Structure formats: structure tokens, C-alpha cells
Image (cartoon, rainbow, N blue to C red):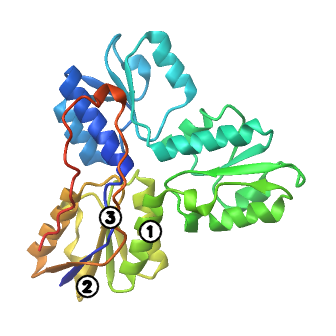
């Protein structure tokens, strides 16, 4: 059986930064360090950080007075920032810079007096953070049907922003529907939508051309991982979202000669290796990697952590 790896796959720069912020905070300030919500949407990552001394909470009220607190990569509403300030909690903000960019776009559009529309998933942590950051009412849409249902006059000047875990392809139909319905629409150029999401989705489409089955490593609550699996289904492949190698069913691979393997932006490459090891227990395996985009982007750390020794960036392993 041939296992073909997508490129790129796994951690993006925002996730690498967020995890490093928690790890360095534990090293510098000592355990426990409190993290509001999961730092990223991957249970393996969360459990690993928990063993190192991170404590994950849903509300700041769960953080004892004076304890170091980290905001997750998804961002938080202003009300949470203000609550932390009122309580005097020391805070490190691990919000992905690309999410912060969406916050700034939303504020800029709101300040022009335009009615703001956000393309995103109801209940997602990033959406809740963005809605709470922009300072104006936000109309949330997920689909073309939602656009049609908006109670906004067609001659109203509107602007849209997008959740970063949605790609150009995910949002194209909704943006077209907005332009068709409203006379005056502003929004970010497609080049400004999260590079990591688009790159991983493009790589999966390439993978589906040469594979018979698609495996996506990621957690069920990871929006970008779930979308990668959905792309496989759309491309006509049996597609499975798996946490690690233990989740594989040997029956999936009966008569299969080529398995496509990728990972969501919050899934570490060691979990990809565990899937390859599980496939080897089913039968002989060769591993190759498709050509793809080389991602070299790095995001800086908060100034409080910049005096610590620099670490080498993680390099994805390829089990052969």
C-alpha cells in the first residue's frame, strides 16, 4: 500500500506560536498557567500541555487571582480582555495574528458606517471573539441561504469579513451572493484570506487525484480539519477524520493501493506518524510526499517572552 502525504499539512505558524507561548510561559513563570479555552482545537496538544502544567478553563472566573493567563489562538471578545484587566490578571495573548487582522478589518469597516457581515460558523470560538472585538453589530452568515434571509435593505452599504479557517473556495459562493444582493459591498481581497487554510485545502484536492482513500488527522471540533475531510467527500473519495492511528479501521483499506494522508492546521506531525505506523500493522507500506507549497512564515512572540532562548522551528517528519 502506498501512503501519499499532502504538502503542506499540520501545524501552521499561528498554531506553532500559540503552543510555544504556553510552553514558554510555563518555563518562565512556573505551573500552573491558565489558558482560556483550548489553546488550539486538538485534544492531543491540549493533553500534552496539561501534563506540562497548563490548566484550561472556560471562564476567567476559574482563574485564581494573580495567575498567568493565556488567551487562545482563536482570540477573545473585548469583554474578556476587560475582565482580565479589572481583575489584574497578567495576560499573554496567543491570538493568531491573522485573526487579529480580521478584527482590525472589521473595526475599519464598522468605522465607515457600513453594516458588517461575517462569514463563519455559529458558536466557533474565533467567530465569538471577532464579534466581541469589532465594536459594531455583526450579521453572521454561513451559507447563500443565510444571505438571502438577511433583514438588510439592498441599498445598504455593507462590508464582510471571514473566519480564518474558511478558504477562498469555502467563501466564494457566499461572497457572490452578497455582491448579487447588495448594491455596495466591500470586503478583503481573496489574497488576504488565511494562507494556511487555502494551502491545506489545495493540497488535499491534489491528493484526491492520486489516492483512493483520504485520511485527515485532526480533532472533531477542528473546523479546518473537518473541512479537509469534506473536500475528500466532495472529490468522491471515502474520507475519514481520525484523531490518531488508533482510530483506523482495517476494513477501510480492503483492496486499496493508495492512501492520501494529511493533517489539520492544529494537528502535530507525530499523530501523522502514528497513522503511518498503524497502516504498517495492516500491511507493507511505502511513503511518499506530493510537491506543494513551502511555508516559511513565522510569527513573533509577545515581548514578555522574547528574552528566552530561541527554539528551532519544528520540521515535519516523513516516516519511510
Lower position in the chain sequence, tag 1 or tag 2: 1
Q: Is label 1 in contact with label 3 (beta carbons under 8 Å)?
A: no
Residue 198 visible in this rendered orientation of the protein = yes
| Residue visible at 22% across and 59% down in the picture | 269
Q: Which is nearer the eye, 256 or 69?
A: 69
Q: Position of residue 299 (x, y in %)?
A: 37, 45
Disc 3 from disc 2: Cα separation: 18 Å
Numbered circle sitting on residue 258: 2
Disc 1 packing (10 Å; few <14; some 14–19; many ≥20): many
Residue 259, picture quadrant: bottom left
| Rendered location of residue 238, percent (x, y) | 37, 78
Tell me which label, 1 or 3, sits earlier in the chain: 3
The residue tagged 1 is 201
The answer to which quarter of the image holds residue 88 is: top left
Q: Nearer the viewer, residue 36 or 149?
A: 36
**Which residue is rendered at x = 41% and y = 50% of the image?**
221
Q: CA distance from mark 1 to mark 2?
A: 19 Å
Element type where label 1 sits in the image: helix
Q: Which residue is mark 3?
A: 9
Q: Quadrant of the N terminus?
A: bottom left
Amino acid at each position: 500500500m502506498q501512503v501519499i502525504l499532502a504538502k503542506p499539512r499540520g501545524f501552521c505558524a499561528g498554531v506553532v506560536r500559540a503552543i510555544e507561548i504556553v510552553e514558554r510561559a510555563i518555563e518562565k513563570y512556573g505551573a500552573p498557567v491558565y489558558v482560556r479555552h483550548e489553546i488550539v482545537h486538538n485534544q492531543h496538544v491540549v493533553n500534552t500541555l496539561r501534563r506540562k502544567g497548563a490548566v484550561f478553563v472556560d471562564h476567567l472566573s476559574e482563574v485564581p487571582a494573580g495567575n498567568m493567563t493565556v488567551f487562545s489562538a482563536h482570540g477573545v471578545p473585548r469583554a474578556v480582555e476587560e475582565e482580565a484587566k479589572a481583575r489584574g490578571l497578567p495576560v499573554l495573548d496567543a491570538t493568531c495574528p491573522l485573526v487579529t487582522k480580521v478584527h482590525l478589518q472589521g473595526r475599519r469597516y464598522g468605522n465607515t458606517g457600513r453594516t458588517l457581515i461575517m462569514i463563519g460558523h455559529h458558536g466557533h470560538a474565533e467567530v465569538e471573539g471577532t464579534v466581541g472585538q469589532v465594536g459594531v453589530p455583526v450579521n453572521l452568515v454561513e451559507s447563500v441561504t443565510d444571505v438571502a434571509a438577511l433583514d438588510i435593505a439592498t441599498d445598504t452599504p455593507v462590508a464582510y469579513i471571514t473566519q480564518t479557517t474558511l478558504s477562498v473556495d469555502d467563501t466564494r459562493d457566499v461572497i457572490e451572493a452578497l455582491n448579487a444582493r447588495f448594491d455596495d459591498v466591500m470586503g478583503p481581497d481573496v489574497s488576504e484570506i488565511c494562507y494556511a487554510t487555502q494551502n491545506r485545502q489545495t493540497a488535499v484536492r491534489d491528493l484526491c487525484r492520486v489516492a483512493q482513500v483520504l485520511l485527515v488527522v485532526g480533532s472533531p471540533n477542528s473546523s479546518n480539519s473537518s473541512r479537509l475531510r469534506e473536500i475528500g467527500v466532495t472529490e468522491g473519495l471515502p474520507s475519514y477524520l481520525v484523531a490518531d492511528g488508533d482510530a483506523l479501521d482495517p476494513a477501510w483499506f480492503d483492496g486499496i493501493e493508495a492512501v492520501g494522508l494529511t493533517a489539520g492546521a492544529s494537528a502535530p506531525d507525530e499523530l501523522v506518524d502514528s497513522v503511518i505506523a498503524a497502516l504498517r500493522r495492516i500491511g507493507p507500506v511505502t511513503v511518499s510526499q506530493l510537491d506543494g507549497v513551502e511555508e516559511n512564515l513565522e510569527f513573533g512572540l509577545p515581548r514578555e517572552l522574547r528574552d528566552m532562548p530561541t527554539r528551532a522551528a519544528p520540521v515535519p517528519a516523513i516516516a519511510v
